[in-house]
């Protein structure tokens, strides 16, 4: 058997080797730029925290008004200077804040004549949202409450004229909240005077709304 002649064998084609792609050099952030960005973000967070704290600790003053008042079963003993009466009040509370809500943990409303309290009542806790008006309708009952001689004489004289002058006092424990921040509990006090009440009729016609002075 004759071996094949190498001269007659087909030539083999060889593919030229492609150069391997070189890895691109990694980008490195400028350390000075990183520090600047971090400081800016930190400044924004600190500023936001200061703003939230300021809104929580220094909120706008709450606005209280007595919208209506009446009295029923009003009587003063001739011999013992004791008062018996049912005082009905409609009180409006307004929260002027846009982003801060108010939590009332407790509230006590009392009525008095010349600083001598004759009746009071505790109000259940409630929450007041931003820009919210809350109406509080309550009845304070005086049952055989002793008066000073001066107040008894003065109330008798006012009753004979058809109108008595009373005062309304509000004391509450409140806290303020904005987003996740809540303030500590603080004492709110409001004084509403003079509240002129018609004793000859239970009608609210002609009642003059009373703006209360508040202190926190």
Image (spheres, grey):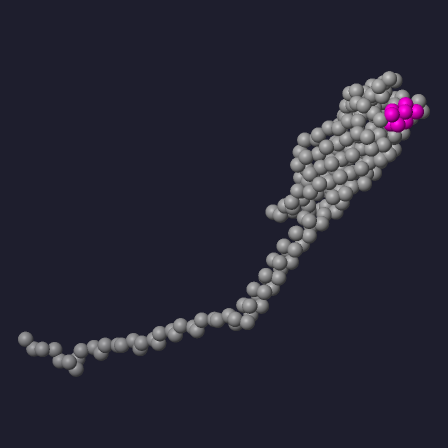
Give the tally of numbered discs: 0
Q: Quadrant of the N terminus?
A: bottom left
* Residue 150 inside the magenta-drawn segment: yes
Query: Which residue is more in the foreground, 201 or 30?
Result: 201
In this view, the residue in front, 139 or 144, is 144
Q: Is residue 23 magenta?
A: no
In this view of the protein, can residue 68 be seen by the observer? no
What is the quadrant of residue 186 in the picture?
A: top right
75 displayed left or right of 173: right
Q: Quadrant of residue 92?
A: top right
- Give percent across and percent down for residue 183: 65, 46
Location of residue 117 in the rendering, given as x and y in whole percent from the top left corner: 79, 29
Place residue 42 in its image quadrant.
bottom right
Residue 190 visible: yes
| Magenta segment, prevailing SS (helix, strand or loop) | helix
Residue depicted at x 78% and y 38%:
190
* Residue at left offset 77%, top offset 43%: 215
Q: Which residues are magenta?
A: 149-157
Q: Position of residue 171 (x, y in %)?
A: 74, 36
Q: Is residue 180 left or right of residue 121?
A: left
Q: Is residue 66 above or below residue 47?
A: above
Q: What residue occupies the far bottom of the structure in this picture? A: 7
Q: Measuring 74% from the left and 44% from the top, which residue is drawn there?
A: 216
Q: Position of residue 68 (x, y in %)?
A: 82, 30
From this viewpoint, which residue is outermost toward the right?
161
Q: Nearer the viewer, residue 198 or 113?
A: 113
Q: Nearer the viewer, residue 210 or 96?
A: 210
């Amino acid at each position: 058997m004759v071996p094949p002649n190498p001269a007659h064998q087909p030539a083999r084609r060889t593919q030229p080797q492609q150069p391997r792609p070189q890895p691109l050099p990694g980008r490195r952030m400028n350390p000075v730029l990183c520090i600047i960005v971090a400081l800016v973000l930190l400044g924004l967070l600190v500023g936001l925290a200061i703003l939230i704290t300021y809104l929580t600790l220094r909120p706008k003053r709450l606005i209280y008004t007595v919208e209506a008042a009446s009295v029923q079963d009003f009587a003063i003993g001739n011999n013992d200077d004791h008062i018996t009466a049912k005082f009905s009040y409609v009180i409006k509370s307004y929260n002027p804040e846009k982003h801060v809500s108010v939590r009332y943990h407790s509230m006590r409303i009392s009525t008095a004549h010349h600083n001598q309290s004759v009746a009071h009542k505790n109000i259940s806790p409630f929450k007041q949202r931003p820009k919210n008006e809350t109406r509080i309708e309550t009845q304070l009952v005086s049952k055989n409450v002793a008066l000073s001689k001066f107040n008894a004489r003065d109330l008798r004289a006012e009753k004979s004229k058809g109108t008595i002058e009373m005062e309304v006092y509000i004391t509450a424990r409140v806290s303020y909240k904005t987003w996740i921040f809540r303030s500590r509990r603080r004492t709110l006090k409001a004084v509403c005077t003079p509240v002129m009440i018609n004793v000859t009729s239970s009608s609210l016609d002609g009642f003059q709304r009373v703006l209360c002075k508040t202190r926190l």
